[in-house]
Each structure stands twice: as structure tokens, then as C-alpha cells.
Image (cartoon, rainbow, N blue to C red):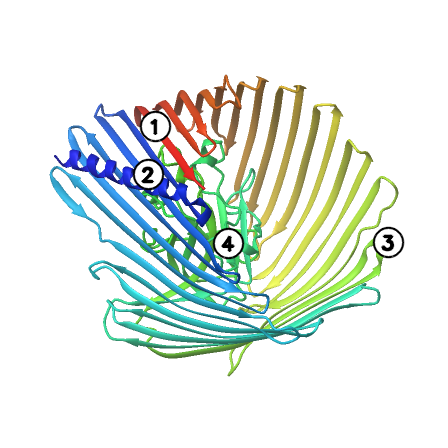
Amino acid sequence: MRRRLTQLRTAAAALGFATALAVASDARADGFSGSAEPQYSAGESHTKDQSGATQDTRFWMLDQRYRLSFNRDLFPSLRLGADASYDWGIGNSITNGVASDADTRRLTLNGRLTGGNDLLSYGLNYSRSQLSSETTSEGKTSSSPTLISENLILNANLRPADLPQLMFFAGRSWAYDLDRKVSDQTNDSAQLQAHYVPTPPVDLIGSFRVDHPVDHLNGTDSVATTESGRVSYSDSFYEKRLPVYVSYAATHIGVDTQVHGTGGTVATLRTPTAGLSAVEAFPDTPQRITLGQNPALVDGNLTAGVGIDLGFARTAAGDTHFRDLGAQLPDLLTSVNTFYVWIDRPLAPEVVTAMGAAGAWTVYRSDDNLTWSQVPIVAPVVFGLFNDRFEITIPETQARYLKVVTRPLATGITTDDRAASILVTELQLVLVVPAEAAKGHTSNASGQLNGAAKYVIDPSTSFAADTALSVTHRFGGGPVTYAVVNGIGAAPRLNEITTLSARGEWSDADFGQGRDDQLRWGANLAVDPIPTLGSSLGYSGIWRHSALGIAYTNSMIGGVRADLYEGISVGGTGSYGVGRAETGQDTTSANASATATFVPHKTMTTAGTYGYTWSRRTGAGLPESTSSSQNLEGTAAWSPIHALYLSGGIARLITNNVPQTTGSFAAGVSPFPGANLQLRFQYAERFDTATHLRTRNYGPSARWTVLPTLYVDVSYTDAQSFSDAEDTKSRIFFARLFWAVR
């Protein structure tokens, strides 16, 4: 009876939304648009572990996604917009005779009224999201709390000519469950910001912000006020050969916290000076890698992607490399004990479980953005009830650089294509303390002076000298941190084929734990006799004196590339380095790699890569340690016609004399590419000798494009997985209908 009622409700919902789409279709001129995307999957799996125990599962799932939006110009300078989305997923599974049902629903509403002109623009926005879920197993039904989040925001921008530009916003957010038993929080916030450019070299900006978060269940009530101001000057002299920049910023943050209950916490965001990220590639490891700049990772935008994808489509394509997400802090005095990793979408429960599992995330700290040491995670990784973010807790830590590391989602966790791409949008570093510890009034006022200048002595050789200064201080006393960097460099072209570049710099810094002096130098010689042949040889060194002691490194690196013939390219690099750590331990390292690409025909491409890395540590009264790794990889792809492709690859990795071999093979057939009816057959196989794991997936799929806005996808997949621990065989049928009205 329950299943029949569910099916009737599903049919009624689909019919009701189809009617809404029909109405929208007739009213397209009024700005209506919508889409319906029901998808159905069913399958079965059989698992047998090494003890002989078996598990048989049969399942079906019906996911429905409905979208409806409306936009209209009420007046020439006033626009109304609204959209609604409804996601409803129901499913049933039977495992070894035990049946369970799941019912999950999410309703999202958005409304916005915007208007204005070049002088004044304004907007009023309201959004509401409601999530509920219910599961039934062995006749017992349990319902998760119905979670609701709401946001109301008013904003305005005034841009008078030759006068300060004003930006204002005020808003309230609610986060609660329907019964007010799990969460009941509100947050009122308002900000006024003024930006003025009295003359182009001078830029003035100031702001005042108030935040009032209240946790009604735990009895915490905080009021935080933030006043900040910045003046900057930027100009260039001597025919733009001397660019100069200087700025001074002052910030005051005052927080008053009242506590009327127990169990509450207060979270304080830390402000990094830079966002950092990397996708590791051999021979990188989480312990030794330099992260690149990624300002979008810490820019405060919680919705825009930053170029890091954690979805299973990356894994399916063979990309299982670690993703490093990090930030640079202004000093060594700032404490952090929590990371918020924001993503661009909500996640299904099975995806949250997989991505938050023990070992899925690791945390590291560093003083130089090169050598990293692991920091323990002291609590289970959780996904926010009301926010699309992972929350990772560590002991209270002070470091110049901090990062979290994870891999993309493994394939097979879900068939929901919404998890095929999961984009990271923001990394926040937070200090979370019990509300009782934050009770009362706290105040923090600081200022930061930054300056930089560069003088181009000889433009023809890029011979230039530069200097940079950063000083941070606290009003009312406290440590002063600073960093001064002076450098000189040049890149003369010795002749038509040879270029020499060299740079030396000295830095003097104190980030709160004593003076840190560094000398860095290096030179590189590049020779390119012809466009298809080139080589380079470089040397670099670092000498560092800090409170921990003296350390230094010296390294040589060389490389060559050659396009021997059309379709044949080879290249190689090698490096050797020696150094000593502050502890007195000596290090020696060597790296080498070679690549080759061969395109015998326009329909076929082959490539090979070899890499070798070795390192040794001795001295300082510690046992000698040596590590090495080798990586040999070959790939090939062949597509004789547009309708057929074949690809494969094999890799051999030897780490400290422990070998591992992985391989993959894929094939696909599309007899009618570009037609309204597209048929495809795919086969893929992967194996890993280290884990003795072999996976195989194959099956047909089809897409029928009935109209430009209406198509149907159907697929059948047979998946097999074999390992020492267990063998699994599964078959899955999938169907999806997508219909849009614009």
C-alpha cells in the first residue's frame, strides 16, 4: 500500500509540474521558463567477501528535479525575478531480504527585486530552502528533522560623480529545524562602505559592519562591530621605470558575547593574506610541494568555483591526484582549529558519507610552503546542516601556512550526475571556542603598512632592483611583525639563441617567533638554437637563519626538449640538490624525468613518461633514512573514425622497492554521431597490483533528442570488481528525461 501511494504521489507531482510547464509555455513572452528532469535507476548487486559471506541487493530510485523561473521588467529601472526548484527522491532497496525505503525532498525558493541606474542601484532578495528526509526499514519509519534556512538581504549602491561611492547592505538569516530541537539560529548583519578616489594615485576606502548572531537553543548572543579603513598610493615615475605602491590599513574588531545557556560556541574567522592550491603530480607528495597562488580561494565568494574539482568524473577519467587547499596567514600568532571547505552544491547522504570518511581528509602545516608536517584531525569530518561545506577540526594550531588535502570522489559511490562535478568555492580558517570562554567583551585593533617599489635600471636587459615592506602592529601594545625583501635581477639576451637570467634577494622578517633572515639566489641559462630544440641549465640556493637554527639548500636543474620530426616530441629534466635543516640533518636529493610523444597518424596518439626521485637524510644523531620512487607510464589512443575510439594506459610505480602496477582500457562506439539518435557502447577496465583490485564496466547507452529542449537518456551498465577482500558484481539500468521550456 505504501509503495502504491508513493507511486500515485509521484505521478501526481509529475502531472502537476507538466501542467505548470504548459502554462509557462503559453506565457513565455512574460518571462517564464522551466524544466522537468525525472530520472530512474534500478539494479542489483552481489558481493562475496574472503570469508565466503554474501550480500545480495536489489534497488530502484526515482529522482525528480523541477525548475520554474519568472523574470519581468515592471518599469524601465525595476525588475522582478523569482525561481523555484523542487527535488524529490524516492527509492527502495532490499538487502539479504531486508527492505528499506527512502524519501528525500528539497524545496528552494528565491525572489529578487532589483532596480536603479548608473547613479543609484538597489535590490531586495529573499531565499528559502527546506530539506526533509524519511527512511523506513523493517517496518520502522524514522524522519530526519526538517531543516530550513532563510535569507533576506537589502542592498544599495550610490555612485555620484567625483564623490565617494557608497555601498550599503542589511540582512537577516535564519537557520532552524521545524521543531526547533536541533538548531535555531539567527544572524542580523549590516555594512556601510565608502570608496573615494580624490586623485588617481590615491585611493581611500572605509567601512563599518555589525554582525549579531544569536543561538537561541544554546543561549549565546554576540554583537561584533568591525571598523576598517585603508589609504593607498600607486604611481610610476621616470617614464614608468619606477612603479611605487604604498598602503596603510587599520582595523578594529569588537565583540560582546552574552551566554545564557550551555553548549554554545563562538566562531571567529581568520583573514589569510593569500589563498594557495595545487593538484599534485609525480613526484609531488602532500609532505613536499609548493602551492601556487589562488586568490579566489579566500576572496569571500562562497558560490564561485576556484578551479578545484572533487567530482567523480575526474576519477572516472583517471585523475585521482591529491587536491591541496591552503592559505597563508599574516603571522605565527594567529590560532586556527577549524577549516570550512565550501562547495558549489548540496550532496546526497551517500556522497557525504564517502567524502567525510576517516582518512578522506588530511591537514598539514608549514613554515615555508615547501616542507609540510601533518596535523591530526581530532573530530569526525561533518557536512554542514544548513551550509554546503565540510567542517574539519584540528587542535589549536599556529603556522604561517596551513592546508587541507583530499582526493576526488571515487566512482561507484553514486549514479547521481550532480556529483560528477563538485567545485570548491572557498576555504575559511576559523577559531571555534566555547561560548563561555568568549563571554564578555573582546577588542582587537591592528594596522598594516605595505609598500613596494621597483626600479628598472636597464630595460634592454630587464636589469632591475626592487624592494617590498610589510609591517603589522597592534594598537594598545603587542608584538610587531614585519618582512622586508630586497632583490636585484636581470635577464639579458646574450645572442639570438641564448638568454641568461639571474636574481638575488635578501629578506629580513619576524612573524612573531623571532627573527628570520634569508638569502636566495639563482641563475638560469636557456639555449634555443631552433624553434623545435631547446635546453636550459639552472642553479639556485637558499640560506636561512631563524630561531630554530641555520639551514641551507643548493640545487642544480637542467632540461632539454626536442620536436624531432612532425608528430615526434621528446623532453627530459633532471635536478640534484644538497642541504642542511635547522636540526643539523643533511639532505641529498635527485630527480629525473623523461617524456616522449609519438603521433604516427592523425587518428592515433601515444605517449610515455618516466620519472625517478631519490632522497637521503643523515646526521644530527638520527638514523640514516633513504627513500626512492620510480614511475613509468605509457598511454595510447586511437580513433580511426568519428564513431569509434580506443584508449589504454599502463603505469608502473616502485616506491622504496615496493612495486605497483595500474592499467586501464576503454573503448566506445557511436554509430550516429551528431544525429538526433545517438547510440554508444563503452567498455573500461582498470587494475592495480598493489591492492589486487580489478574493475570492469561496460554497457550500451543512447540519447534521443526529440526537440532542442527535450531529450531522453537510457543506459545499461554491467560493473564488476575483484579484490582479495571481496568480489562484487552489479547491473544498473538508468533512464532520464529532460524537458525545458524557455
Q: Nearer the viewer, mark 3 or mark 2?
A: 2
- Residue sitting at x 44%, y 22%: 685
The amino acid sitting under disc 2 is Ala
Q: Is residue 137 above or below residue 706?
A: below
Q: Disc number at residue 734?
A: 1
Mark 3 lies on a secondary structure that is helix
Q: CA distance from mark 2 to mark 1?
A: 22 Å
Kind of element beneath mark 4: strand
Q: Which mark lies nearer to you, 1 or 4? A: 1
Is 284 drawn above or below residue 378 in the view shown?
above
Q: CA distance from mark 3 to mark 1?
A: 64 Å
Residue 349 to residue 612: above or below: below
> Is residue 738 at least partly visible in the picture?
yes
- Gap in angstroms between the C-alphas marked 3 and 4: 38 Å
Where is mark 3, residue-wise?
460
Going from the N terminus, do you reach mark 3 or mark 2 first?
A: 2
Q: Give how far apart the Cα atoms at labels 3 and 2 are.
A: 69 Å
376 or 541, nearer to the observer: 376
At x 23%, y 72%, the residue is 261
Where disc 1 sits, the SS reads: strand
Name the residue that disc number 2 marks. Answer: 18
| Numbered badge on residue 326 | 4
Residue at far right of view: 495
Front label number (3 vs 1):
1
How far apart, in angstroms, are the residues tagged by discs 2 and 4?
A: 46 Å
- Sequence order check, earlier mark of 2 and 4: 2
- Quarter holding the C terminus is top left
Residue at (61%, 25%) from the top-left corner?
A: 607
Which of 722/554 is in front? 722
